Amino acid sequence: MPNKLIIAIDGPAGSGKSTTAKILADRIGYLYIDTGAMYRAITFLAIRDNFVNNSVEIINKTKNCKIELAYENGLTRVFVDGEEVTEFIREKDVNDCVSEISKIEEVRSELVRKQKELGKNGGVVMEGRDIGTVVFPYADVKVFLTASIDERAVRRTKEYVQKGKNIPMEDVKHNLETRDKIDSSRIVSPLKIAEDAFIVDTTALTVDEQVNEILIQINKILELKND
């Protein structure tokens, strides 16, 4: 795809953002950026180093650490100050705490700054919760993925099972509902649908169907740009 578009994909946990964004980026030859991994990395460090309840320390760590993302063979590898934390940032304790840490204003502003730098030249598919509203409000393509809470709980539970973790689906569903509430009600960069976003309900769609719907939208936008 010759045009260096900025494609923003937002949505709640379990809506299919990561899988869809990865495949889409592969198909069109764009860079895939998982912004949620950055918040997860900070959360993991806060848990590991016992400052999860110390917002001052969390803010200092966010400002002073170097977060690097490398997308290789379908996996986003995450490094903080040279240390790989890829496996640890998807643990349940990180899931349980990431929304609380993500709502800290100084944490969001610092990571948004880093995200803008990563995607400023275009040719990116960036996914998160505030890409189309805050990080890149002028993105060429804005997509908001959604799905029923029950379907999202099923998906997330399957992910845990694949990792050998037996977590009751009701617990997973409760965590998702809690995260939804925190993410959508926070004062800074809340999860919301951008006015000009293309909404895709993924509840009953396959991944290929999700990607194809977005590709159709991208092509429509490209036709308008080239007229």
Image (cartoon, helix red, strand yellow):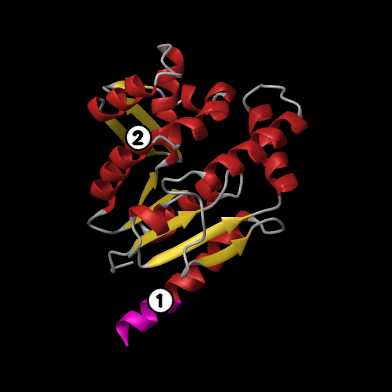
Q: Position of residue 103 (x, y in %)?
A: 45, 37
Secondary element at image label 1: helix
Q: Position of residue 60 (x, y in %)?
A: 28, 24
Our reading of the magenta stretch's main secondary structure is: helix
Relative placement, left or right, of 148 versus 227 is: right
Disc ID at residue 95: none
Secondary element at image label 2: helix
Query: Image quarter for residue 150?
Result: top right
Work out whether residue 70 can be spotted.
no
Q: Position of residue 118 (x, y in %)?
A: 26, 47
Reply yes or no: does residue 226 show up in magenta: yes
Relative placement, left or right, of 33 versus 94 is: left
Q: Residue furthest front?
A: 187
Reply yes or no: does residue 102 show up in magenta: no
Residue at x 40% of width, y 76% of height: 221
Disc ID at residue 221: 1
Residues in magenta, as a range: 220-227
Disc ID at residue 107: 2
- State whether residue 226 is above or below residue 193: below
Residue type beneath disc 2: Val
